[in-house]
Amino acid sequence: MNERHFQPAVIRHLFLLGLNAALTLAFDASVASLAGSIISGEDEGAALLIVLALAAVTALLLWLATAALLRRLTLFCRTPELSLSSDGIHVRCYRHGFRVLFTPWFPWQEQRIAWTDFRGCRIHQVLFYDVLPVRKSLFLESSGPVVEITWGMFRHSVARLQAEILDYHQLEVLRPAGESARVPEFLGLLFRTPLVFSGPRLGRSEVPGTILALVAAGVLFCLHFREFGLATALAAYLSLAGLAIGGGAAVLSRWIRKTRFIRLNSEGLSVGPDVETACLIPWAELALVRVHAAGGTPSSLTSIELRRRDGTAVIIRSFPEAARLAAIIDPPADLVRQAWRLIREGQDPVAAARAAGLSDGQPEIGN
């Protein structure tokens, strides 16, 4: 199995090292100039108190800057490490926190996470006024302690690191196990009777709501034009027209997704706008299945990525049943082996899948 190593962000550390040094020198020069101007004033007692206060603040900031410089220098002697292998994940990284600001060294943590103990990885970010990212971290979860990889520790972003780790886990660890369990052949037997997923349907209030918004916009435009003039009428019309356009766009997008065709059969997975133009992905060509869902969002915003062995991918967006579809077409290898054992004993593939726990209690499989 190929090993994967990630390089630390050396250039970023060099830039921050030079920036810390420049800011420290500039601050010291400005404080010395300000203190000299205060001492030359008439009130020597008040000037002395101000100088002492500035000296205390300068000492604190100088210590913080010096500690930051020393922390950056330690990164060139002991760089962070992240590697992926057949044994699992080896990570050595430094910790962040409020106490780190006052210490001239980084607390380090080192952990090896076996793939059998790997529970996934998630991204957590802190936004300034819900717009600008202030802090972004990748958390590696396992049966042991959670490891945090902060933004800028490695050359890759935390989103890229998450994608690389999940790709390696599924392509290099899980797929060989699936091939040994003959998962593609098992899916071909399971869906001899096709299973079709329908797209989202139109909401009951979307079409009438859009029509009412258009009618209300026209009525208000006529009334305001007669009583309040053209400017007020245009403002009212544009505000309601925006609501109507938004509702119409939602209806159109849902209608387009409603015509999406997703079908599982013995040959593979068919995806497309309709039966005639659907693209067939054979079971043997399906290399990776991944569900993308943002935290705290409705399930209707969930998407699923289907990647072929040649690297091309099909992404089905706004698919509420993405998690169920992923569980069906990417089953655990040990459960598939158990189902094969039941099939060899004479059971039907659908009954064997349910007995092995692969159907997850969904009666639609094979019906």
Image (cartoon, rainbow, N blue to C red):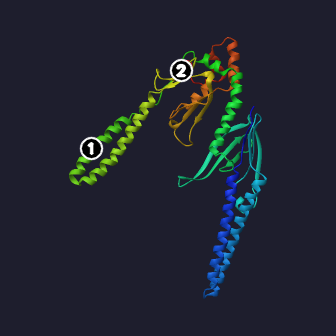
Q: Position of residue 345 (x, y in %)?
A: 70, 12
**164 horizontally vs 277: left or right:** right
Q: Residue 205, can we see it?
A: no
Quarter placement of the C terminus: top right
Residue at position x 52%, y 36% from top?
Answer: 299
Q: Position of residue 211 (x, y in %)?
A: 32, 38
Q: Residues within 10 Å of mark 1 (few under 14, many from 20)?
A: some
Of 365 and 11, the residue lying toward us: 11
Q: Is residue 7 above or below residue 307?
A: below
Mark 2 vs 1: CB contact within 8 A: no
Of 16 and 361, the residue lying toward us: 16
Counting residues from the start of the chain, the first of labels 2 and 1 encountered is 2
Question: Which residue is tagged 2?
Answer: 195
Q: What's the distance in space between the residues labelled 2 and 1, CA to CA?
A: 46 Å
Q: Give, as a three-letter code, the residue at label 2.
A: Leu
Q: Position of residue 225 (x, y in %)?
A: 23, 51
Among the 4 quarters of the image, the one containing residue 216: top left
Question: Which residue is tagged 1?
Answer: 218
Of 25 and 220, the residue lying toward us: 25
Residue at position x 68%, y 27% from top?
Answer: 175
**210 horizontally vs 134: left or right:** left
